[in-house]
Image: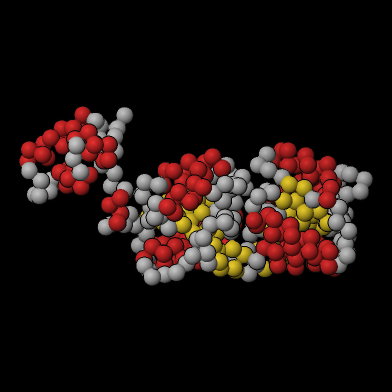
Amino acid sequence: MSVNLKELSKKLNLSISTVSRALRDSSEISEATKKRVKKKARELNYHANPFASNLRNQKSKTIAVIIPAIANTFFSLATNGAESFAQEKGYHVLIYQTHEELAREISISKHLQNGRVDGIMISLTKETFDTSHIKELMDKGIPVVFFDRVAENLQVPKITTDDFESAFKGTEHLIKSGCKRISFIGISEVLAINNNRLAGCLAAMQKHKIKIDKSILITCDEDRIKNKQKIKKLLNSTNRPDAVFACVEEIAISSYEICEELKLNIPKDLKIMSYSNLNTSAILKSALTSITQPAYEMGREAASELFKIMYKKDYVSVGSTIVLKSSLIVRNSTK
């Protein structure tokens, strides 16, 4: 088991700065002290960390992007946007996937606390209700920027889209298309994006005096098989909804599959709309009406904010939120 610099210094009864200089062969330190320090370092299995506190004087030229899943079209595009900006600045990007697990998000955060990156972009998991691990990063002086899935309680830059407004607009489109029983299928009860989209949907129904049936407002999780069972039960009921508003594209695709299984015609028997950045949305059997987020632009904007914090000492970014507009693209699934 190895020790860190602080522990090594304590064992030698020397200051951290003296031990550090001795290990670097500084001319300020006597040969006797250097030999003593290096011998003890070997005995205690000490290994210098080039990424640690010395980053005050040098940069790693690397940033981290923490996302739920790279296979998700939105996060893939957002990561591309961040990479394009970072490359222009001569930086590399490390991509970490949480796979929607809070435990992994915490583990990655702990891993990055040693200063191996100059800054972090993060989009939270659907399980993240406690952000103390992110606060620990901030307390260690590591710049953090949120994008899409943000922690509203932390005073750091946030890059989001107009989730409430776009959901309101999308729901109004469904209502104008004749829908009276609209099912919103969400992915989390703690994520701000989910709750803002649900709120926008409900507000539009209230405005147009559409009855809200809470029994058809459901939440899915990471288990795709169980999710499909939930959707099948919903669409196989005697009083099934006439529209599904999916919070994410994966739920929309599962809804298509269940409709195929139950021989339901889209859009005659059921209209479907979703937040989606899928390139294949337009070529589905009944092309998917989607609310498309500017994912690539969000990634670039988040990276831009991160670099401002990293390099502009006088940059004031506390709690700033940048909201980008999403686009409603009407296709056959709601006509």
Position of residue 129 in the picture relative to residue 301 (left or right): right
Residue 229: percent from left, percent from top: 78, 39
| Extreme residue in the front direction | 13
Q: Which residue is drawn at 73% across and 47% down?
A: 219
Q: Which residue is drawn at 79% across and 45% down?
A: 231
Residue 273: percent from left, percent from top: 75, 59
Residue 231 visible to an observer of this rendering: yes
Residue 48: percent from left, percent from top: 26, 42
| Extreme residue in the right direction | 238
Residue 256 visible to an observer of this rendering: no
> In front here: 334 or 157?
157
> In front here: 26 or 93?
26
Quarter of the figure with the C terminus: bottom right
Numbered-mark total:
0
Position of residue 229 in the picture relative to residue 277 (left or right): right
Quarter of the rendering containing residue 311: bottom left
Q: Is 14 located above or below residue 156 in the figure?
A: above
Position of residue 325 in the picture relative to residue 239 (left or right): left
| Extreme residue in the left direction | 31
Residue 51: percent from left, percent from top: 31, 48
Q: Residue at x 47, y 44 (%)?
A: 108
Figure colour scheme? secondary structure
Q: Residue at x 83, y 45 (%)?
A: 234
> In front here: 305 or 241?
305
Q: Is 95 located above or below residue 5 in the figure?
A: below
Quarter of the figure with the N terminus: top left
